[in-house]
Amino acid sequence: MAERDEGPLVAENPGGAGSFVIVCDHASNRVPERYGSLGLPAAALETHIAWDPGALAVARGLSDRLDAPLLWPSVSRLVIDCNRDPAAPDLIITEGEGRPVPGNRDLDPGERAHRLGTIHAPYHAGIDACLAERLAEGVPTALVAIHSFTPVWGGETRPWQIGVVFDEDRRLADEVIEALKSDPAVTVGVNQPYSPADRVYYTLARHGSGQGLPAVMIEIRNDEISDVAGLQKWAAKLADLFEAVAPSVSDAGHAAA
């Protein structure tokens, strides 16, 4: 797979000609050397506080099958969350899942601006550039974000194996939900375990619905993709699903262009 690394932005298969562009906002748990470990033990960087385990592998499977560009930031969300509005209170967390993040406490405005300018802004500029190039060439385009979530949150067990998150534009989400619900073995969350009201939809709102493009967020419970078999299963299942809805995406994408 061709890869182009531009600072914090990793672009895989950037010239992919399929109908989808895949983003994976929380693909990496890497903390740049200048930040040390942000005061956290190494084991914490392997947990959901730092990234979405399994999400990148599923996203790569989709990119391969769908001939889709895949864009992701190569920096942990602990440093800055690229799926948050720059004004969001959880853009740079000082505590996550009950664990303090000492290296993010008492940040001065200059450090906050540095992280925005060197990580957050280049990532979103890369998505803008990819979409602009495709639309200029008349390539029909829909945006898909791949995330993962924990089986238990706040003491509550989450029953969904997969969640579909969307805003007012349901063009893609309705087809995805219908296809997933056709499998009786799958419990589907509709705007669960998160919804746009939880501030998790920034990337898709900015680049998808904000540009008139169909968009949907896929959240996979991370125990479903904790091994190779699970990763392959969900990548294949989602690729088949998106291949099936590609013709309608083509119509919508052409309309947006």
Image: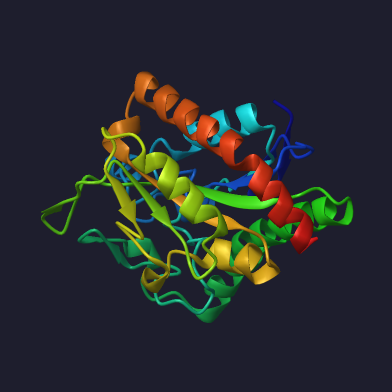
Task: Name the one closer to the observer, 33 or 246.
Answer: 246
Q: Quadrant of the C terminus?
A: bottom right
Q: Residue at x 53, y 30 (%)?
A: 240
Q: Residue at x 51, y 36 (%)?
A: 241
Q: Quadrant of the N terminus?
A: top right
Farthest left residue in view? 155
Task: Name the one closer to the observer, 31 or 239.
Answer: 239
Question: In this rendering, is residue 167 above or below 231?
Answer: below
Percent across and percent down for residue 68 are 68, 38
On the question of residue 193 being in view, the answer is: yes
Percent across and percent down for residue 232 are 44, 23
Task: Name the one closer to the observer, 37 or 224.
Answer: 224
Percent across and percent down for residue 85 are 52, 73
Colour scheme used in the picture?
A: rainbow
Q: Residue at x 34, y 23 (%)?
A: 227
On the question of residue 7 being in view, the answer is: no
Query: Residue 81 vs residue 48: left or right?
Result: right
Q: Residue at x 38, y 73 (%)?
A: 197
Farthest top residue in view? 229
Question: In this rendering, is residue 110 above or below 79?
Answer: below
Farthest right residue in view? 137
Percent across and percent down for residue 54 are 41, 35
Query: Residue 243 vs residue 147: left or right?
Result: right
